[in-house]
Image (cartoon, grey):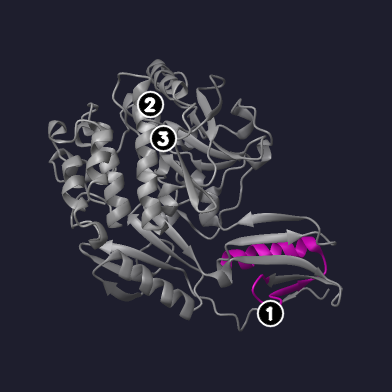
Amino acid sequence: MFDRTMEANVPQHPPLEIVKQGRVWLVEAYQQGTREGDTFSTHDSQIDAVRAAKTRMEADRRPCTLRWDSPNSVGNLYWNPLFERIDVRFDELLDAWTVVPERGTCAMAVCESRQTACDAAKRIQRDYDFKHLRAYDAEASDFETRDHRFLRYDITSSGVRFDPANVEEAAEPVEDGTDATAKADAGEERAVGPMSPSQLGASIPDVTKVTFIDTNGVIHRYATPWGDGTDAEILAVSRKHVEDPNVREVFERWLSRWQEATDSPSVAHIHESGVDPGQWVAYAADGHTLASTGTDLPVETRLSVIEQVVDAVEAVEAVSSLPVCGVHPGNIHVQSSGTDWSVTVANWGLEWATRRAVGTHESTSFTAPEQVDGRLTSTTAVYQVGALAYWLLAESLPGAVSENKQGALGAGDVSPERPVTPLYRDASDVIERALSTDPDDRYRSVPAFRRALRGVV
């Protein structure tokens, strides 16, 4: 009877986005990914654009800033602390349920029932772009959470291909647990759809907490809490390809290599794997992927990450004479423990090989040129670790910007665009050799590249 909202004087501005056009970085208003928002400033470097965007975000009270690495890939997402969370709480003074920002004192809605307040909070979260919604019970002793649609779709996860225009205002879960945005981006998979959590077959502690990270292509990716209190990710062959004998053979072969090295502290631990209803593997994935944290880490930590990635490559090479691939920020998990950071690397080419098996592989800035032709060499991992080092130290993706990255790789257009950050300018020549188009011109091994990099940093 007294349900009401009080939002008239609350500033409502769209998020910002940072987009590279040619050699210039633009700070624009995000308009559902249409790239038609107002342009506020232009900058010669990414770091200057990030600083300007954060300043405007705070000054204008905008909720967040998206930094795009490509038209279909968000490299990072920066959130305004004022929009970190909105709470649903029972207010004894008002004898009513209220919707109040965590960093605010005025209610944006006052409702007679908890359900009505939760419905109002969902709309407010969507309209004003709050990062989290937390709904408490009457005693404020327990709560439920709901993430912003960007997080539910996990658009910052490396490897997630994504049409920005599909991240519309409505992204409510549908009955199998996927977000509507993930469904919309499934493309040719729409008619088949991803496996539901109950179909995965893994010993998932609570299938209701499984989230869909990427349901596009031959390999689908899920996240879930694990029974020991840690987090895990699951890679599963899509239902469209579970009967393909080539996919089965490739998945099992590459998974076997990973399993043989899983005792190494820098190789992601495999919890479980299976073949019902299709091939899948569940592995430890604590912390964050390097794709979302890499260039935000202190420089010394970035160097430590490179060292630990090399350790992981050595561990996998030690159990197999076959070339190694799969070194990509989205496959690298980092976790802090005090002042130390631990790194684990997952996947190990499993996705690359299975996608090649069905002819759907797409190149990234971390793809070695020979991989474009479906080949691996003894120095493919050198290229990938070199690309990772360039990205971490130069804060820029390796290789010249091109609308057709695969064509650029095939043409050998992969040299660094600018020297590594002045603090480690001498590292530029070392990294450029690792990024040589001709595999024979690179360092003979990943440890050899590490020794050379150590000598200049």
Looking at the rendered structure, the kind of residue marked 2 is: Val
- Tag 3, which secondary structure? loop
Q: Position of residue 281 (x, y in %)?
A: 52, 27
Q: CA distance from mark 2 to mark 1?
A: 58 Å
In this view, the residue in front, 281 or 390, is 390
Magenta residue check for 115? yes
Looking at the rendered structure, the kind of residue marked 1 is: Met
- Tag 2, which secondary structure? helix
Residue pictured at 38% horizontal, 26% vertical? 316
Q: Give, as a single range, the part of the protein colored magenta.
A: 101-127
Question: Relative to 179, does residue 129 appear above or below in the rendering?
Answer: below
The residue under label 1 is 6
Q: Position of residue 408 (x, y in %)?
A: 17, 44
Q: Position of residue 9 (x, y in %)?
A: 61, 84
Point out the image quarter for the N terminus: bottom right
Q: CA distance from mark 3 to mark 2?
A: 26 Å
In this view, the residue in front, 267 or 249, is 267
The residue under label 2 is 316
Q: CA distance from mark 1 to mark 3?
A: 44 Å
- Tag 1, which secondary structure? loop
Give the total number of marks visible in the rendering: 3
Q: Nearer the viewer, mark 3 or mark 2?
A: 2
Residue pictured at 16% horizontal, 38% vertical? 410
Q: Position of residue 147 (x, y in %)?
A: 60, 56
Task: State the mark number for residue 217.
Answer: 3
Looking at the rendered structure, the kind of residue marked 3 is: Gly
Identify the mark nearer the N-term, 1 or 3.
Answer: 1
Residue pictured at 57% horizontal, 20% vertical? 276
Residue 271, can we see it? Answer: yes
Identify the mark nearer the N-term, 2 or 1.
Answer: 1
